[in-house]
Image (cartoon, helix red, strand yellow):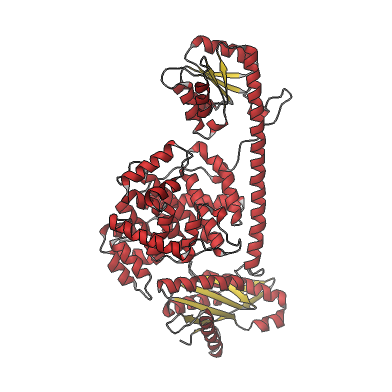
Amino acid sequence: MSEPLPDNVKHFRFDRLQELKAMGELPSPKGAALAVMRLARKDGVSIAELVRAVQTDPALVGRLIKAANAPEVGAQRPVAAVQDALILLGAPTVRNLALSFSLLTGHRSGQCANFNYRRFWSHSLACAVAAQAIAAQVRTAPPEEAFSVGLLCRIGELSLATVFPEEYSRLLGQVMSDRNASLAALEQHAFAMTHTELTVAILQDWGLPRMFVDPVFAHEAPESANFSPDSRPYRLIWTLTLARLIADICLAVEAERRGLMHKLFLVGSKLSLNAEILTALCDQVVRDWQEWAAQLSVDTNDVPPFDELSKAPAAPELSQAGMPSAAMGADGSLRVLVVDDDNGSRTLLRTILVQAGYTVFEAADGREGFDKALEVQPHILITNWMMPGMDGVELTRSLRQTKFGRAIYILILTALDTEEKLLEAFDAGADDFMSKPLKARVLGARLRAGLRVMMLQQEIDRDREEIRRFAAELAVTNQRLQEAAITDVLTDLPNRRYAIERFQQEWQAANRTKRPMACMMIDVDNFKAINDTHGHDVGDVVLKQTAQAIKSGLRAQDVICRTGGDEFLVICPETDLAAAMLCGERVRKAVAGVRLTTGMLEIKCSISVGVAARGMDTPDIDALIKRADEGAYQAKQQGRNCVATVQ
């Protein structure tokens, strides 16, 4: 495994960060938000402490109460007290709202003229929501942690715009005017570090763990990161890459969204997400993004369903006449747009083109031509160079900046035949030129050449669609393999392998944040007798239905796994011993209240639950599980169908 962030580089960036802190105020959480984030890392923090921290910021109080009353939260009655809002939302959501609101409050706008602050926050919020959804789907990291990383993965850009507003605006202007310019190279030359390096330094300074910092450093060039495909850093890198791509699609103009879809499926396949799962996930991201944006007063776009975006137009097929039939107009002809300020020239071109079997549209100047092109989306554009207002070269350049405009075959008519002028036309994006006066046969030959180019584009589109299908099939295969490796076949719950990996993640998170953590070991009572009396088929049914009953009694944050036989392990993040005991009793009642049925047979089942919580004297995961197992044994000794702990 590679080390994307060597220690000497880390120290260099940390020193540079201290210099930047001295030069200006870098974006960072402040006030109540900072207090909430610090409290979230403390062990056993109470709701009362969080309430006191939040109440110092009336605006944050209002945001949290508004969020708690949102329809999707599902409050049983209107929430008016901040304490009720905190209980309903949960500490992780409160932390993310506080972090988002704090950073947005101080940096919605700024002095960097070419930095689009509104778009930055809209993109960052979409990326955060997408990272959270992806992490929940592919289990790369705790979803709430992924939200924070997605929100902050571009914080270096905002920081440079804040500390060096004039210089950074100049660099952004260079990138806007020259598409070949590298922003990272310009940043390195001007500031001795790139925005990605600054992001990493800030996240380290804020105490984010290495497991998140390295993926942030590598995600802008994921293909060059040398991690094993089955490693967590690899999956985190592609989680961030996919989240940013989803955010790009959310903010893209309508004409450009479809062009990003094939890349979406390719990136999704890196995480074993097939097309059906990925499009459904993206649709949910859009809904969540719009809900979060409403709470934080951030701009959003209307985004069509991703399944609709993924349906590329049918690849054109050749007709018997040699024309692409699917690309033809309603009467079987290609659409050609003629743009010329001279009515006589337009009439002549129309006559020639109609006789050749084309469907012809006209515009009298460049601006009208651009609007007409948006409307009819021609296959071929013939434009005069010299026109008042927007000339033919400017029209070409404007069209090439749009997604659909890049597919148009553009022929420029000109009386200028100097080498410099022709180079200017081709640099603007023209495919061909033709000198005036017009010659019908030469024009026909030029258009046939354009048709050959369109045919090649057709082949490219077919190859792209084939890649999309291949990526979808590969994602399905990878998803099945991955799910099979971590899923218990009988109960469809995560298996022991997943339990160990997830336990390690939650243990590290608890160590980092100093938050409580507990677990439960659950044994099905008298299960051997059920197997011996009714057979293993009945025993399997009992296990399935018991697993669902246990799951119904757990909280959303709890993770249940079948570790073998009639044993289940439940991981309880951010839970102390008292809360875990209450949760265990709720699970016990859920199982006891269900009558398990198979055929004509009805069986009443119960469970023994052992509970243990992580303490200062708990050295590792094995010790915690052992204490929970001892609790389950004690529950059986007490007569079964009860909850016990040895702590």
Q: In the rendered view, tell whether residue 41 sits above or below residue 354.
A: below
Q: In the rendered view, tell whether residue 210 sits above or below residue 355.
A: below
Q: Is residue 332 visible?
A: no
The residue located at (48%, 75%) in the rendering is: 586
**Residue 517 appears in which quarter of the rendering?**
bottom left
**Residue 574 appears in which quarter of the rendering?**
bottom left
Q: Depth check: give the residue in front, 291 or 299.
A: 299
Q: Position of residue 315 (x, y in %)?
A: 66, 35
Question: Residue furthest toward the right?
Answer: 320
Q: Depth check: give the residue in front, 231 or 40.
A: 231
Left or right: 57 as drawn, with respect to 484 = left
Left or right: 118 as drawn, with respect to 246 = left
Q: Total of numbered circles in the picture?
A: 0
Q: Position of residue 24 (x, y in %)?
A: 28, 54
Q: Is residue 115 visible?
A: yes
Q: Depth check: give the residue in front, 289 or 556.
A: 289
